[in-house]
Amino acid sequence: SAGDVLEDDPVGRLKVFVYDLPSKYNTKILRKDPRCLTHMFAAEIFMHRFLLSSPVRTLNPEEADWFYTPVYTTCDLTPSGLPLPFKSPRMMRSAIQLISTNWPYWNRTEGADHFFVVPHDFGACFHYQ
């Protein structure tokens, strides 16, 4: 019944750890160009903000089901407002290198339980593989 669905609380079970990355991967880019907040690819910013205050967030990575890597891959804009997707692989590789050398969680699963938000449609050719 509908009551059973509503009583089931998946949010209470799901836990996401948000990596606290250096600002060069996210907030510094946004400060450099606030157009990112209104760009059609702003989902990466809003997902980061949402997760920071979400009930699914855990501050204890040992409890985490998922690990969010807040890298704003489409926030580096040209003067005309277009994203520079060719920078995404470098940013992602750099973040993965940082995470995998400073925390044990990436290495446990080779990143299978980690996620990035990549809101554009430029294709897999622009991203870390």
Image (cartoon, helix red, strand yellow):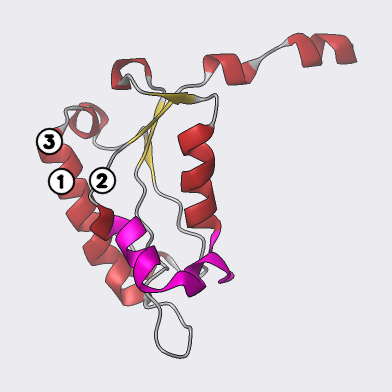
Residue count near mark 2 (Cα–Cα under 10 Å), binned few <14, some 14–19, many ≥20? some
Q: Is 52 situated left or right of 6 in this image?
A: left
Residue at 36% across / 15% down in the picture? Answer: 63
Q: In which quarter of the image is residue 84?
A: bottom left
Q: Is residue 88 magenta?
A: no
Residue at 49% across / 37% down in the picture? Answer: 51
Q: What residue is shown with label 2?
A: 21
User: Which of 83/23 is in front?
Assistant: 23
Q: What residue is shown with label 3?
A: 102
Residue 40, image x and y in percent?
59, 70
Q: What residue is shown with label 1?
A: 98
Q: Is the magenta stretch mostly helix, strand or loop?
A: helix
Residue at 17% across / 27% down in the picture? Answer: 104
Pointers 1 and 3 in contact (C-beta within 8 Å):
yes
Disc 1 to disc 3, C-alpha distance: 6 Å
Q: In which quarter of the image is residue 62?
A: top left
Specify whether residue 81 is in view.
yes
Residue 95, image x and y in percent?
22, 51
Residue 54, image x and y in percent?
54, 31
Q: What stretch is highlighted in magenta?
A: 25-42
Taking 35 as reference, is 119 above or below it? above
